[in-house]
Amino acid sequence: MERKSSPIELFYCYARKDRVLRDELDMHLAGLRRTGLITAWYDGAISPGTAWQKEIETHLNTAHVILLLVSPDFISSDYCYSKEMGRAILSQQCLCILWQRECSTQPWEVPRSFSSIRASLADGSQ
C-alpha cells in the first residue's frame, strides 16, 4: 500500500557523548522510517564544510517532532541546553523528552526550562 501523506520529520537533540544511545533509538525506529512514516535528522548528517549552526537551525524549524534525549551530558552542554532545547521549547512543534541516563535532576525535579511542559515517565505516571 502506498503512503500518500508526507513522512513525519524527527529531529534528534542530544549530547555527543550520547551518540550510542541516539543510534540505538534510531535503530528501533527503522521500521517506521522504512515504511515512509518518518524521516529522522541529527547533526551527524551535516556535510563537512557546511555551516553547521545554520543547518541545525533549519532542521529545528522544519521538524514535526523534536526529540530531546536528556542526560547529564545534555544538561551540562550549553549548546544542547540553551540553544537547541531553548529553541525547541519556544517552537510549535511536538516536543518529546526522553531521559537517556540517570541524572541528578530527576524527571519530577525538571529544570526551569521544562516547567511549562507536561511530562510523563516511562511507567505512565506524571
Image (cartoon, rainbow, N blue to C red):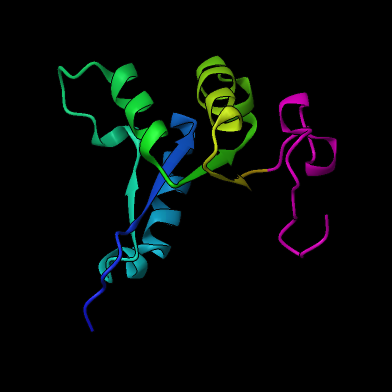
Location of residue 8 with respect to 22 vertically, above or below = below
Q: Is residue 22 left or right of residue 53?
A: right
Please report the residue visible at 61 percent of the width from the left and 31 percent of the height from the top: 89
Magenta stretch: helix, strand or loop mostly: loop
At a point 18% along the width and 19% down the height, the residue shown is 50
Furthest-bottom residue in view?
Answer: 1
**Residue in the image at 55% along x and 41% along y:** 69
Tell me the quadrant of the picture where the C terminus can be found. Answer: bottom right
Residue 125: percent from the left, percent from the top? 82, 60
Q: Position of residue 62 (x, y in %)?
A: 36, 38
- The residue nearer to you, when weighing 20 against 62, is 62
Q: Quadrant of the N terminus?
A: bottom left
**Residue 90 position in % (x across, y down):** 59, 28
**Apparent side of residue 7 relative to residue 83 in the rendered image (left or right):** left
Task: Give x and y (percent) for residue 3.
Answer: 26, 73
Residue 112 inside the magenta-drawn segment: yes
Report the residue at 15% width, 17% height from top. Answer: 49
Does the stretch in magenta take in 124? yes
35 relative to 83 in the view: left or right: left
As displayed, is residue 105 above or below residue 53? below
**Does residue 19 appear in the picture of this structure?**
yes
Nearest the viewer among 98 and 85 is: 85
The image shows a total of numbered marks equal to: 0
From where the camera sits, is residue 99 visible? no
Instruction: Read off the magenta span.
Output: 102-126
